[in-house]
């Protein structure tokens, strides 16, 4: 397996597949403090998961099937393309909507996070 952008679940590392399955089960919520090491999600210990529930909704609780092969949606491919390029870092919050990554807050290393210019050294 290479470090390029994955196109289907067949292209995922086991840790990526586990994360994808978790997002599909969560459906709406967020995954917090997700460590990335050598381009892969660190799932031991499992990151904090917060699921959003809406009262008064239609009440259905669809449980997606896991371990099925399929093409990745753009949002999932974008997430894994990003994480595969991270040597060591942390996603503070990965927001999940409709079982897909929606947005994330990423902790940047000190040097990377400094603003250039303006004399703030």
Image (cartoon, rainbow, N blue to C red):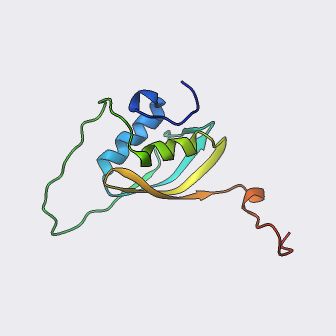
The number of discs equals 0
Residue 82 pos. (x, y %): 57, 45
Q: Splitting the image into 4 quarters, where does residue 96 fall?
A: bottom left
Which of the image's four quarters has the N terminus? Answer: top right
Q: Splitting the image into 4 quarters, where does residue 102 fall?
A: bottom left
Q: Splitting the image into 4 quarters, where does residue 111 fall?
A: bottom right
At 39% across and 32% down in the image, what residue appears? Answer: 9
* Camera-side residue of 117 and 50: 117
- Residue 61 vs 85, above or below: the answer is below
At 40% across and 33% down in the image, what residue appears? Answer: 8
Q: Looking at this rendering, what residue extends furthest in the bottom direction?
A: 118
- Residue 76 vs 13, above or below: the answer is below
Residue 107 pos. (x, y %): 62, 57
Residue 72 pos. (x, y %): 39, 39
At 41% across and 27% down in the image, what residue appears? Answer: 10
* Camera-side residue of 2 and 65: 2
Residue 56 pos. (x, y %): 15, 69
At 58% across and 32% down in the image, what residue appears? Answer: 3
């Amino acid at each position: 397996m290479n470090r390029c952008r994955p196109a289907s679940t067949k292209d995922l590392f086991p840790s990526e597949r586990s994360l994808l399955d978790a997002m599909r089960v969560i459906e709406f919520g967020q995954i917090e403090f997700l460590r990335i090491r050598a381009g892969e999600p660190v799932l031991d210990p499992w990151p904090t998961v917060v699921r959003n529930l809406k009262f008064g909704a239609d009440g259905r609780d669809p449980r997606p099937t896991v371990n099925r092969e399929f093409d990745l949606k753009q949002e999932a491919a974008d997430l894994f393309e990003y994480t595969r390029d991270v040597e060591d870092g942390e996603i503070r919050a990965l927001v999940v909507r409709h079982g897909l990554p929606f947005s994330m807050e990423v902790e940047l290393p000190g040097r990377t996070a400094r603003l250039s210019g303006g004399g703030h050294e």
